[in-house]
Amino acid sequence: MVAGAISKGINDKTLSTMFSNTDALINQAEKILLQTLSSNSVQVKEPISILYSEAYKTASESYSKDSFSLVQARGYRRIDAKKRANAINLFEALGIRGQLYTTFTFEKGIIGVGKLKTGLLKAYTSMDVLILDENGKKVFQKKYSAHSDKSVYVVSGIYGSKDLMELFPETMQAVSKAFAESLKKN
């Protein structure tokens, strides 16, 4: 989903640039989410201890048709969240009480469209969240969305991709904060 959505959102011609921007966005989203959770007193296991664990390395991956369009954050694999054995093995090996799976989707949208695709371009981020308990059972699932307050001018469909990319951190922060706040309520 991330790669498919971001490919529509970047005005660069080369595939390598597109995936470079996608990698940058997803790694930045991970960092913002972890910082937001930590600052809201949500205990999070250090990703490095998870990624290098034997349980993580041997967990089965998801091979659904949608999983092939996903871009993973640096060092991550496409772990199949639907296989309870994965969850149970990770819980036992890491001593954790819950597992968090997130999927970020990054898009762009033109508002106030005039003639020839001219108007203002906003960044949109959605974050799908899935939390599993120690038995691999789904205990929480929700989608959070946000759009940028600022915008970039687009004239005849042409805009600066760097300017667009600078709008995404605000939306990543907004969805991460909304998620952290919803955890306080539960």
Image (tube, rainbow, N blue to C red):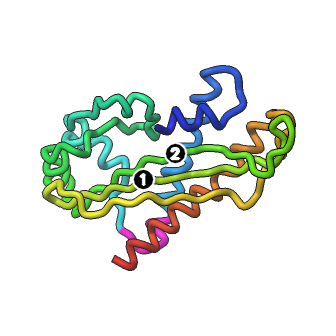
Spatial separation of the CA atoms under disc 2 and disc 1: 8 Å
Query: In this figure, which residue is indicated by the disc labeled 1?
Result: 128
Q: Is residue 23 visible?
A: no
Q: Is residue 144 magenta?
A: no
**Residue beneath the point at 67% across and 34% down:** 10
Proximity of marks 2 and 1: CB atoms separated by less than 8 Å: yes
The front one of 89 and 71 is 71
Q: Position of residue 165 (x, y in %)?
A: 69, 44
Give how far across and how far down residue 98 sits, in percent. 25, 61
Can residue 115 be seen in this snapshot?
Answer: yes
Query: Where residue 101 sits: x, y (%)?
Result: 35, 51
Q: Where is mark 2, residue-wise? A: 105
Give the class, few, some or many, for how many residues have Cα within 10 Å of label 1's Cα (few <14, many ≥20): some
Query: Who's the residue at 62% across and 34% down the image?
Result: 8
Rendered position, 92 above or below 16: below
Range of residues picked out in magenta: 36-42
Amino acid at pointer 2 = Thr
Which residue reaches farthest bottom?
185
Residue 106: percent from left, percent from top: 57, 44
| Front in this rendered view, residue 90 or 153 | 153
